[in-house]
Amino acid sequence: MGRAVLKAVIDDADLELVGAVDINGGADTGDLAGTGKNGVLVETGLAAALERLRPDVMIDFTRPDVVYGNVLTALSHKVSPVVGTTGLSDAQKAEIKAAAEANDTPAFIAPNFAIGAVLMMLMSRMAAKYMPDVEIIELHHDNKLDAPSGTAVQTAAMIAEVRAPHVQGHPDEEEKIAGARGAAYEGMRIHSVRLPGYVAHQEVIFGGLGQTLSIRHDSLNRESFMPGVVLAAKKVRGLKSLTVGLDKLL
């Protein structure tokens, strides 16, 4: 994801790459992106890089255990974070919102930057008004660290806006193996698949009297996220406080 973001920023005429940070430093970002050397080298210290470079925006695709600290560091330097790393808790998002307001610096978080995934979530919320029995299956590569995915959680939250909480399935059903019915979210069920070969995929299945409806999105490569990342990088400075979800920018 880091290499894909580098290339997307370098290729966009309205954006300028001024720095990059990773635990492994020293490489030329142009070499990493496959666009040719540009003299912008990867650094290892985030705070020092932000202090010296004074960027407008920091794009974060890291890990659930470090993204929260990265975002707070960016906001303390009045740099707007655009975050694609999932796994932030509601409490952490509340702290990020408070930090954004205290530093008068907008922040943006998206569970998924693919335009099609955003449309899938919006369509699922629309469908849930009429078919409230629903389950979510999300499928990702086997190196993903959090489950369910941020996209699945956001989808369930959007569905819950229009769906009265109720438990689905037979009231006397029994799991022969714990977890077989997936995670529960206001009576809905979310199932996570982790296998090599997948990138990011989600299917939302609705059941009704004599019919089913499936809404599915597939990201076939990491380039699918880049238009959304670039859009957020361009628009984040015009936002207020903390904004969550790419649908707010479309």
Image: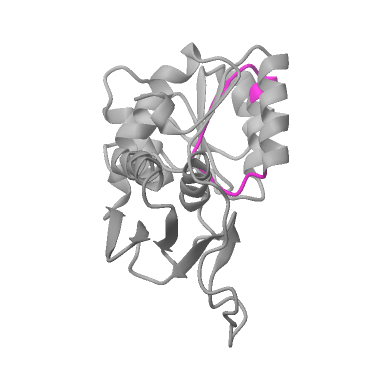
Residue at 41% x, 38% y is: 28
Residue at the outermost front position = 209
The one nearer the camera, 61 or 150, is 150
| Observer-nearest of 62 and 153 | 153
Image: 166 above or below 77: below
Q: Position of residue 133 (x, y in %)?
A: 44, 58
- Percent x, y of residue 149: 50, 55
- Residue 214 placement (x, y as % from top left): 29, 58
For the point 47% across and 12% down, which residue is it? 238
Which residue occupies the foreground of this view, 248 or 237?
A: 248
Magenta range: 75-89
235 versus 61 height, above or below:
above
- Tell me which residue sits at (50%, 60%) in the image: 144
Q: Main secondary structure of the magenta part?
A: loop
Residue 231 figure quarter: top left
Q: Is residue 228 above or below residue 153?
A: above
Does the image show residue 215? yes
Q: How is the image coloured?
A: one colour
Left or right: 159 in relation to 130: right
Which residue shows up at 63% across the image and 32% down it? Answer: 71
Q: Quadrant of the C terminus?
A: top left
Quadrant assignment, res 5: top left
Residue closest to the far bottom: 176
Q: Quarter-wise, where is residue 198 in the image?
A: bottom left
Q: Is residue 206 above or below residue 49?
A: below
Q: Is residue 121 left or right of residue 165?
A: left
Residue nearest the viewer, comparing 72 with 130: 130
- Tell me where residue 72 appears, x and y as whole percent: 69, 30
Q: How many marks?
A: 0
Q: Is residue 30 visible?
A: no
Q: Is residue 16 magenta?
A: no
